[in-house]
Image (cartoon, rainbow, N blue to C red):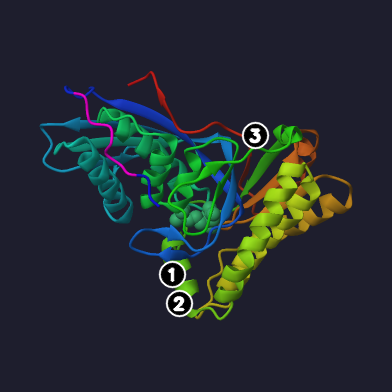
Amino acid sequence: MPPTLGTARASVPLPTGCRAIAHSNIALAKYWGKRDRELNLPDVPSLSLTLAGLTTSTWVRFDRQLVADELVLNGSKVDGPAASKAVALLERVRQAAGINLRARIESSNDFPTAAGLASSASGFAALARASVGAAGLDFSSRELSDLARSASVSAARSIFGGFVTLEAGAFFAEPLEVANDAEQLRMVIAVTERGPKAVSSTAGMLHTRETSPYYPAWRDGAPLVHRELREALVAGDLHRAGAAMEHSTLAMHASMFAARPALIYFNAATLSAIQAVRELRAAGAFAYFTIDAGPHVKVLTLSEDVSRVNERLSALPGVIRVLISGSGGGARLTEDA
Ligand code: PMV
């Protein structure tokens, strides 16, 4: 059941503006496919790690002077699908608050936008947190997660820090308690392309679902992989978790390879990085890869192996840069309005 929004009413007058930050998250068990397109509900369960190193900062103000909502992303005005999703999210906030004011949103990322680095996750989580604050509302984390999910399923997970799980068909994500040694985990991201991806994740997953004969196999197998990953993390069995993580991403991409026409997010450096991770592992490092709707390779490793993994990935032809991050906290308001 969706949480009921609108139980908290807006205090009048509205605050002058609210800023929130949220971190990106990388799914270890992937979400790929919508159960309900209208409601934007996931067809498979997913499990992610929120990353301190990839952050969106978003400022929102409801303003009597405005005739339409305005979205400025990384300094440029934005129209199109991202803006429509933001407006739909604001609409839910306006309804809950009982206000009819348009808003100005100013958002910036400290990492590449719409390139398969989960900028929509941190972006819509930060927008949910900031717009609820700017409307004078007080939402629970579940309500915030539901609000963020309505714009982008992965954003539901960025409301929370650390490991986060989102069940198939769920309206909101939930944090997952894991064994302590998970604090040593790091994500090393090999960025293998500049600029935005060619096919958005929404378009990609709809196309896969409609045309790939492997989509049902992916959808039916995903809950098992999710459960295996979850159990392995809770038990602190990181090698088992890493193996489940690789299986999840490869099964997801296999469903895309079999779409008509095929959907291939990989480039040559993606394959080189996969190979490098397998070699690092054979040489004794803790390193497992995952790849989203883009060509970058995200490597789950431990603090003690970070420099090895970083050196190896940085030396690969086609790797433009490497980002390193540990686990981060959930979406939150910041002082700086
Ligand atoms: O929620 P979206 O539209 O950003 O889709 C995310 C899809 C993947 O990044 C490929 C997987 C995931 O679970 O984050």
Q: In what quadrant of the picture does the C terminus appear?
A: top left
Spatial CA span between label 2 and label 3:
36 Å
Residue type for callout 1: Leu
Q: Is residue 59 visible?
A: no
Whether residues under marks 2 and 1 lie with C-beta atoms below 8 angstroms apart, the answer is yes
Give percent across and percent down for residue 60. 28, 32
Please state the extent of the stretch shown in magenta in the rendering: 4-11
Residue for badge 3: 326
Q: Which mark is residue 210?
A: 2
Q: Is residue 64 left or right of residue 4?
A: left
Q: Secondary structure at mark 2?
A: helix
- Relative to residue 308, is residue 337 depicted above or below? above
Vertical placement of residue 315 versus 261, above or below: above
Q: Earlier in the sequence, mark 2 or mark 3?
A: 2
- Report whether 259 appears left or right of 232: left
Helix, strand or loop status at disc 1: helix
Please state the horizontal and vertical placement of residue 246, each as a whole percent of the image.
70, 58
| Residue marked by disc 1 | 206
Q: Is residue 119 above or below residue 103?
A: below
